[in-house]
Image: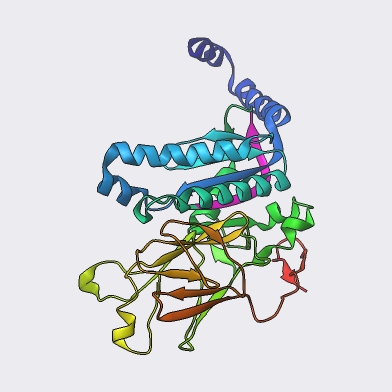
Amino acid sequence: MTASYDELCRSLSMTEIIQLQSALSVALRQRFERKAALAFSDIVGSTEYFARFGDEEGRRLQQRHLDLLARALRGTRGRIMNTAGDGALLLFDGGRPALACMEAFMKALAEDNAERAPHHRLAVRVGIHHGSLLTDDVQVTGDAVNLCARVAASAEPQEIRLTREAFNACEDARFRTRCRVLPPVTLKGVAGTVHLLALGWRDAAGVPERVRLDTGVEHVLPDQDVISFGRPTDATMGPSADIALRCRTEDLTRAISRWHFQLLRRAEGFSIRPISDAPTELNGRLLAKGEEVQVAPGDCVRVGSVLSLWLEAADIDQAQTVIQLAPEGRAPHHS
């Protein structure tokens, strides 16, 4: 076929070649250009993971990423278009199915991570954009692809970021009211500043936001899938728990294990799981090591028979944020 093209081009005059170029450009747009939503998911820290655990484990991590995406795509009209490197590019008919699928993916990922050791948990960044692109349903190309990848690269681990165009393309209030406006950013290869939003994909209703110790100390729960609690250690003893538990005296603190219990983010909220032989009680009931029980704001956890902590929600119920659309070229804003 390439030889035939070469022969055709040699037979045409310069004017005819220019005319053919214009005709092909029009045909390309008419047949393959359309507006659609793209999502790009990229693994965080894969280079370090490959270096530490080797090619086999690294490839297994990549496959887990793709398997979780494929599971989230079931029942949708979306599909994976490209899996080059550590990223995956997905194509959707509109903004709502893109947001719904990537939210389902993040929730499935959180469930999967809860069952794995910390160093084998999968972290990703997700970007979503809606715009004009060229696709034959086998491959996809256009500036929208580059922009979507850049949006993903700007996200924090386990964060879904979307462009204003993707927000405008989703009419479902269940997603729109959970979008938070971010400060304008500059993206590599993209002219000017870009206005982005972040989708709050974790269920917030009835879920603890912080813990309060009987010593008066409070800790805001970090935005991660597994949160560990335990006795503080110095740097020479290696990694320590995410939240340090200190009693009023060092003697009492020593009754708490370095890794005492975990809070795990599940689809329905938080669960507690003791990981120490030392006692962990929930509302007065002794939990077995490895037992998993759902918790809610107001629950009391007794640690090592020496320290109590309470799970608490936000101080006040915050009304849902309403985002009003701004004119073209400006960012959405909160009302």
The answer to whether residue 190 is left or right of residue 95 is left
Image quadrant where residue 77 sits: top right
Whole-percent x, y for residue 219 in the image: 49, 78
Viewport quadrant of the C terminus: bottom right
Pick the residue in front: 292 or 12.
292
Whole-percent x, y for residue 303 in the image: 42, 74
The answer to whether residue 320 is left or right of residue 127 is right
Whole-percent x, y for residue 152 in the image: 53, 53
Q: Is residue 292 above or below residue 211?
A: above
The answer to whether residue 189 is left or right of residue 130 is left
Q: Is residue 146 above or below residue 264?
A: above
> Magenta region, mostly helix, strand or loop?
strand
Residue 170 is a magenta residue: no
Residue 132 is a magenta residue: yes
Q: Residue at x 67, y 67 (%)?
A: 206
Q: Residue at x 62, y 67 (%)?
A: 207
Q: Is residue 189 visible?
A: no
Q: Is residue 47 visible?
A: yes
Q: Residue at x 72, y 66 (%)?
A: 332
In this picture, which residue range is highlighted in magenta? 125-135
Whole-percent x, y for residue 286 in the image: 47, 67
Pick the residue in front: 267 or 250.
250
Image quadrant where residue 310 sits: bottom right
Number of numbered discs overlaid on the protein picture:
0
Q: Residue at x 59, y 26 (%)?
A: 138
